Amino acid sequence: MTNSAFDRTLVLIPARMASTRLPGKPLADIAGLPMIVQVAKRAEEAKAGRIIVAVDHQDVFDAVKAAGFEVVMTREDHQSGSDRIFEAVEKADPDRRMEFVINVQGDLPTIEPEAVRASLRPLENAGTDIATLTVEITDEHEKTNPNVVKIVGSPLSETRLKALYFTRATAPYGQGPLYHHIGLYAYRRAALEKFVTLGPSALEKRESLEQLRALEAGMRIDAEIVRSVPLGVDTPADLEKARAILSARS
């Protein structure tokens, strides 16, 4: 995307306080800052657009505000991050000046700023509704691991795929690369508005993958191929890894 897209892009970071495996996750200390603030800093370094953190707890709201980032309070009962960011978009941009929305998960404190920027590139194609990221799988174990979501896509270039399907199975069959889907999305605003009105689809429920809802509704998803999978912090062990990475950087 061109630099002019900056003024038309919202970078939304949803933060949910409730977590069964890591209670209070957004406020977990990483290199002297709450994790959610570290994520906001990575988004700031990306220089991709206006940054807004969407929270559901007053303590997280206060921590983000104290760090100098824009923050909006959202409902606690959202079923997905996309629903939370949609509420935040409506509150933050009621005049509808923003055309693009990047959804950066609030548990990616070590994400490379370049990956955030890369998520917008597929939207250069006017026919693409939603953009996302993927990386070629090099670990043999990951090829058969159902926790590693694969994207089955038709190559558009050396760095981009048109998504045909997402699956936990090992796919596609035969010789050739397999791709690990990274759950960071960039939406056209109209596409986000459409997506949140759709009910859960048959394949979505079968695979437990929300993005299949968009494909089943005829929406186009393209994926930019990047170099590495960002560390998602879901467990205490992940948290220690993130602390080591950011402590080393500082």
Image (cartoon, rainbow, N blue to C red):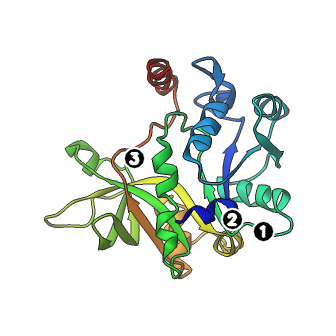
The structure residue drawn at horizontal position 35% and vertical position 67%, both measured from the top left corner, is 160
> As drawn, is 149 to the left or to the right of 234?
left
Sequence order check: which comes first, mark 1 or mark 2? 2
209, 107: nearer the viewer: 107
On the image, which quarter does residue 63 sit in?
top right
On the image, which quarter does residue 60 sit in?
top right
In the rendered image, residue 94, in percent from the top left (x then y), is placed at: 86, 65
In the rendered image, residue 66, in percent from the top left (x then y), is placed at: 80, 28
Residue 80 visible in the picture: no
21, 151: nearer the viewer: 151
Q: CA distance from mark 3 to mark 2?
A: 34 Å
> As drawn, is 160 to the left or to the right of 196?
left
Q: Give the labeled residue for mark 1.
A: 97
The structure residue drawn at horizontal position 68% and vertical position 75%, both measured from the top left corner, is 190
SS for callout 3: loop
Q: Residues within 10 Å of mark 3 (few under 14, many from 20)?
A: few
> As drawn, is 139 to the left or to the right of 75?
left
Q: Give the labeled residue for mark 3.
A: 147
Q: Give the labeled residue for mark 2.
A: 8
Q: Residues within 10 Å of mark 2 (few under 14, many from 20)?
A: some
